Amino acid sequence: MAKILLVEDNEMNRDMLSRRLIKKGYDLVMAMDGEQAIEMARSESPDLILMDISLPGLDGWEATRRLKALPETKAIPIIALTAHAMAGDREKCLEAGCNDYDTKPVEFPRLLGKIQEFLGK
């Protein structure tokens, strides 16, 4: 069973996504900010990270940069989840080290397709 780290500060978004991912059979761990995301990625070794970009404190951009700089977490695929859907935002996510990008509100079937693609399902 693949393990996903969901990094999301909004309780409603976290609840909705976590329930749907667990229902699909994923093992889920959660973080609510960038610092916690880095700690969880290092201790839990997830197969994939869903990273909210707008986080309190250490934001998703910087958390991603730090994760990609650490030897033990640099290979973990990261999908950015963001309400930022402006021109150039996808490129900004990729430059920060994200492997892909998806917009909020989350269209679950599309996100699930991306997750399955990265996990080789």
Image: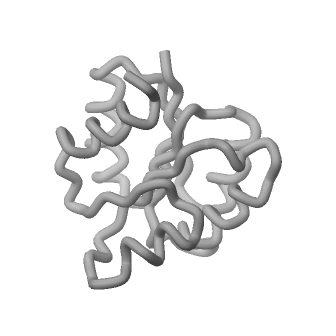
Q: Is residue 88 left or right of residue 74?
A: left
Residue at the far bottom in the pictured view:
87
Q: Is residue 35 above or below residue 17?
A: below
| Image x and y of residue 119, in percent | 46, 29
Residue at 17% x, 50% y is 107
Q: Which residue is drawn at 36% across and 48% down?
A: 14
Q: In this view, does 74 lie above or below 2?
A: below
Residue 1 relative to residue 90: left or right: right
Q: On the rendered image, what quadrant is the C terminus found in?
A: top left
Q: Looking at the image, is 32 positioned above or below residue 17?
A: below
Question: How far across and how far down the image is residue 76, in percent?
Answer: 61, 42
- Residue extending farthest to the right is 71
| Residue name at image x 63 percent, y 72 percent | 62
Q: Nearer the viewer, residue 120 or 15?
A: 120
Q: In the rendered view, how is the structure colored?
A: one colour
Q: How many marks?
A: 0
Q: In which quarter of the image is residue 42?
A: top right
Image point (68%, 32%), residue name: 44
Tell me if 30 is positioned left or right of 34 in this view: left
Determine which quarter of the picture holds residue 84: bottom left
Residue 86, percent across and down? 27, 83
